[in-house]
Image: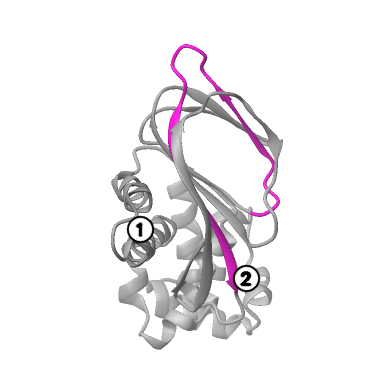
Amino acid sequence: MIRFNWNNVLFDMTDIGGGPLGEDIPRHAHAKNSYELHFIVGGKGKLITDTNEYELSAGDFFITGPNIYHEQTADKNEPVKDVFIMLQAVNTDKTNAISSTFLENHFCFFKYFDISTAQEILAEFRSKKIDYESAVCGLTIKLLTDITRYFLPDSFGKSISTDGLYDKRFVIIEQAFLYTPDLTLTELSNKIGVCERQTQRLLKKYYGKTFREKKNESKLNKS
């Protein structure tokens, strides 16, 4: 087991592996603070969750986190090949906006993801060369950062100060606009624990927009 720290969260890397999926994986879910990262290298298969089905092919990437029930089926003629990394978050008491963004996304599915870093992690782990643990930790830290960049807008690093990286309100606002249908200013204010006037100030600080402007932008992005 390899242990490392990323953005104030201590992680244990409990398993790394990969290769052809020789048999179907039955429906299951991972425990609290447990995340499995899957990188599809080749072949064909299917990922089945409680809400959707996904045809798997090279370049696909998905996370199955705590309490996400899922199963996989493999194409018998061309079995899916993958790299998987199991992570356990050991200490989540001091998360910042970056690490909390990763931890709060219990499921995601992306196509055309750059899987080369995951492949390099597996190669280092299997090689057992001198100080391979340090190489694996460094590459995994880069990988987690790359993944989290998919969840956050490019404006994240420009719109807030260094101290603001520890302000979880930004992440709560992002998630609210993404996943709360017909979001109101009152609902958003309640989520972040400030008055409506302060919420408007935060929106101006983070995005340079009013609540109405940000909501309309979110609707356009979803359409």
| Residue at horizontal 46 percent and vertical 26 percent from the top | 80
| Residue at horizontal 29 percent and vertical 45 percent from the top | 116
**Left or right of 124 on screen, residue 4:** right
21 lies above or below 206: above
Q: Which residue is mark 2?
A: 188
Q: Earlier in the sequence, mark 1 or mark 2?
A: 1
Q: Position of residue 204 (x, y in %)?
A: 42, 78
Q: Position of residue 13 (x, y in %)?
A: 51, 60
**Between 184 and 160, which is closer to the camera in this rendering?**
160
189 lies above or below 223: below
Residue farthest toward the bottom in the current orientation of the protein = 163
Q: Quadrant of residue 89?
A: bottom right
How far is mark 1 from mark 2, CA to CA? 28 Å
Q: Which residue is mark 1?
A: 146
Specify start and end residues of the magenta stretch as a single range: 66-91
Q: Element type at marker 2?
A: helix
Q: Quadrant of residue 139?
A: bottom left
Q: Position of residue 207 (x, y in %)?
A: 39, 71
Colouring = one colour
**Between 4 and 182, which is closer to the camera in this rendering?**
4
Q: Please indicate, yes or no, whether residue 81 appears anywhere in the rendered image.
A: yes
| Residue at horizontal 61 percent and vertical 52 percent from the top | 65
Residue 81 magenta-highlighted: yes
Q: Please indicate, yes or no, whether residue 174 appears anywhere in the rendered image.
A: no
